[in-house]
Image (cartoon, helix red, strand yellow):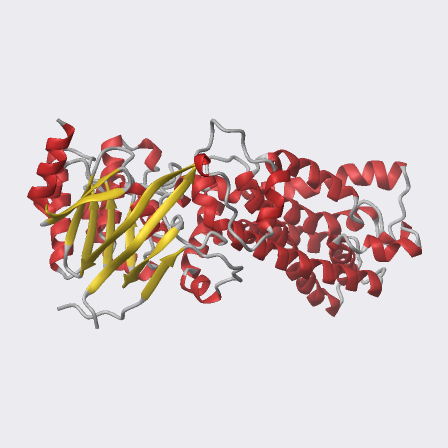
Amino acid sequence: MSDIAIRVNGLGKRYRLGEKLPYKTIKEELPKIFSFRKSLAKNDDYIWALRDISFEVRKGEAVGVIGKNGAGKSTLLKILSKITEPTEGNAEINGKMGSLLEVGTGFHPELTGRENIYFNGAILGMKKKEIDRKFDEIVAFSEVEKFLDTPVKRYSSGMYVRLAFAVAAHLEPDILLIDEVLAVGDAGFQKKCIEKMKNVAQEGRAILFISHNLTAVQSLCKRTIYIVDGRILKDGFTTESIDTYVSSTN
Amino acid sequence: MVFFKMSKTVIKSRHNWKSINLKELWEYRELLLFLVWKDIRIRYKQSLLGAAWAVIQPFSMMVIFSVFFGRFMKVPSEGIPYPVFAYCALVPWTYFSNSLTKATSSVIDYQGIITKVYFPRILLPLSAVLQNLFDFLIAFVLLIIMILFFNIGITPKIFLSFMFLMLMILTAAGAGFLLSAINVEYRDVRHAITFIVQLWLFATPIAYPASIVPERWRTLYGLNPLVGIIEGFRWSLTGKSPPDIKMLSVSFLTIMILLLLGIFCFRNMEKTFADVV
């Protein structure tokens, strides 16, 4: 059994430059929907959000991903979490994966805190039994015990985010993908979240962690990948990658 | 050291047609139930009349139909009291039209979620179709009460009504898969749906019996899958006017084709949902 959690080979994602261009018309599209081939339109209509991305993540390893806005970090996570398909290349995922692209995904304002824990947990891929088992822990972590039976639309934004993160933090996948979710809550809560993540890594799970918060990256990951314009510019020790990143932005 | 069962996933762009991944759907069965449960919960929160709405819609349509079509226009009703005749068809029809409308917008309604989390997208239209069964059941209870009230008498054929309900679910699912997928890319569908549902209502033997359609047109008429279903449903409950077998077969065939078309279109288009929604 190999100890590789994620193996990415030459991954690339091309997007159509939408919106400003005339939108697709049914007449143009119908034949394509029913055709087996991928249509190839003019090259200048497209942009490569990600190109030639290759790397490996071992079990128990936490890898940071940094880069400017629009560098392709989120696209990478979206491909790895199966939300969108790559245009070229492939990725191998060994184990059950959980992704945290935004806290509170699937929270419904009308549902109570209790109901949202279950619904959100299910959306994130937890089984009901698993949620039952971790329910008390989640509630304790979120510090909203008193408001469990209040619809979350009446929550303060802090309470909302704490509850959302608490659910997400109790996912137990073999591989965890995290995108900028620690930018929530006050300093104390953020620290608690980082600690929680560290525990996850120590349990032998793999983490891919995207953030603009360099301190958080540094305290969680030994290794960091620096992405510029959809390509990997540096893949090495976190301190070195951050140095390259910081010096390039100055 | 933690040992876990390894599951290996390969992510790459897929080019060929894919059928439904039943194994994966089975793994996600709990999420399907949660989606159904959540929508039923939310629908009646902060609502005064609550679940009574499930009855109000078909019942008020039945009243209007009975007055105008039944009483004034004297539309034939195959020896069944007109209110029962109409309500018998309006209960499954209401289920169908609500399910279809809800399913059509289902993927878009979950826009915020499908761009953030992966799960089989087909659960969304599927849950839209399943959650309306709750309303159907409530309206169905009133239907039974009405049948007893009008002294029509219930025969063992009533069990066949479940078969027709199943066909109704499949039709709503097939059309729902198809329209929800197209709706992601072309919002035209959203505007068209109200209108489609209205046309469909009058092209289906709800206010009138299928027998008023001339004999030679019946097979063609059966192409509307709801024709066979509604006639069959009414027959199974009232025991009157058995559906034309040729018409029923055509309807059955259309349902299967619609379902397959829906699944294949949905599965083929879903890979770009998160990019275009």
Image-quadrant location for residue B228: bottom right
**Residue A234, horizontal then vertical, whole percent:** 16, 44
Could you say which is closer to the camera, residue B239 or residue A101?
A101
Q: Is residue B179 left or right of residue A13?
A: right
Which is more toward the observer, A126 or B82? A126
Q: Is residue A150 left or right of residue A87?
A: left
Please name the residue shown 49% across and 47% down the image.
B40
Q: Residue at x 27, y 56 (%)?
A: A8
Question: Which image quadrant is residue B32 in?
Answer: bottom left
Q: From where the camera sits, is residue A172 visible?
A: no
Residue A111, given in percent of the width and then of the height, sits at 38, 41
Return the residue nearer the eye: B264 or A42: A42
Q: Tally the marks.
A: 0
Residue furthest bottom in the image: A1
The quadrant of the picture occupied by the N terminus of chain B is bottom left
Q: Nearer the viewer, residue B254 or B248?
A: B254
**Horizontal and vertical percent position of residue B19:** 53, 62
Res B223 → quadrant: bottom right
Residue under the image location 56 percent in, 41 percent down: B183
Q: Residue furthest front?
A: A43
Observer able to see residue B194: yes
Q: Position of residue A162 (x, y in %)?
A: 22, 39
